[in-house]
Amino acid sequence: MYPILFRLGPFELRSYGVMLTIAFITGYIIATKRARKVKLSPDIILNIAVIIVVSAIVGSRLFYIASHTSKLTYKTILTAFLPIQADGTIGISGLSMMGGIALAILAPFIYIKLKKLSFLKIVDVIAPEFLLGVGITRIGCFLNGCCYGKPCQGFLCFVFSPNSAAGSRFFGTPILATQLISSFMGFLLFALVMLLERYKKFDGYSFALTLILYSIDRSIIDTIRYYSPDVIMGHIGNIQIVNNHIILGLLFIVGIFVFLYYGRRKGKVENK
């Protein structure tokens, strides 16, 4: 595994950051092309893309801190967004993706409403690219050795580098590469949403599909990922329930609501 591609003084070029950058650029290019097809200004997509990046980092960091209450101190709150770590390296560590997703939906919603634009029309353009981004960035997670599964034997079980989070936690022990499973599912779900878009009949269709499919996929993944006791809420039989499942449940409900409400409303208009 290659968590760090190279170092230059205190600066570290991390594989996760590289894959995240690739995901953002790729998603932006695709979203811009999709926006032109529905006569949306590329400038709107750029503005929203910047808002999403900032809100995703803020939301991910805040949710991580809130989830790890045992590590919560005045110092961690005051230094939550400082780009310099305790060991002198540059970067922000300790991010939880679910908080980023929640804020990355809320912040653009506020911006779009203030601009008096169509929220559902815009998120239909950009939502599927999120799934593609998951596929790309989870490769970065695998290289970085984060977001890993539990000890296992057999297919998709790897021994991670000891200088990674996975390797330091389970030194010399094969663990399930949930990152690769998540990556594969991200690419698969992106392709599926693109395929199903041919049946689109109302604004919000692709957005709803993305929320529904991702929430189901991530809910399953989170039952087999390794999590610290801080974020495990309990178990249903042998299935672990973590705090992510709360947000995932809400995303699923929102997706179902958008799909049924706007789909049914469109059907009523056509039948008049």
Image (cartoon, helix red, strand yellow):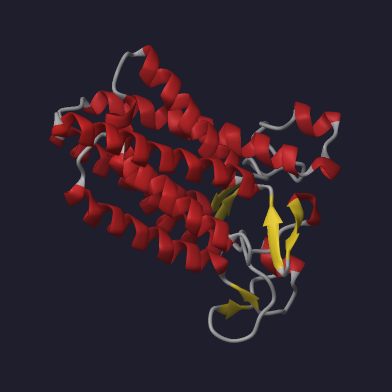
- Residue at the far bottom in the pictured view: 154
- Residue at the far front in the pictured view: 272
Across and down, in percent, residue 114 comes to 39, 13
Q: Nearer the viewer, residue 60 or 251?
A: 251
1 sits to left or right of 127? right
Q: Nearer the viewer, residue 10 or 102?
A: 102
Q: Residue at x 43, y 49 (%)?
A: 212
Q: Could you tell me which quadrant the C terminus lies in?
A: top left
Across and down, in percent, residue 22 comes to 38, 50
The quadrant in which residue 221 appears is: bottom right
Q: Is residue 196 above or below residue 238?
A: above
Q: Nearer the viewer, residue 19 or 65?
A: 65
Q: Is residue 22 above or below residue 202?
A: below
Inspect this view and state whether residue 15 appears: no
The quadrant in which residue 11 appears is: top right
Q: Nearer the viewer, residue 164 or 37?
A: 37
Q: Is residue 150 above or below residue 272?
A: below
Q: Could you tell me which quadrant the N terminus lies in?
A: bottom right
The quadrant in which residue 31 appears is: top left
Across and down, in percent, residue 138 comes to 49, 58
Disc tally is 0
Q: Residue at x 59, y 42 (%)?
A: 247
Q: Residue at x 42, y 26 (%)?
A: 108
Q: Residue at x 17, y 50 (%)?
A: 198
Inspect this view and state whether residue 52 appears: yes
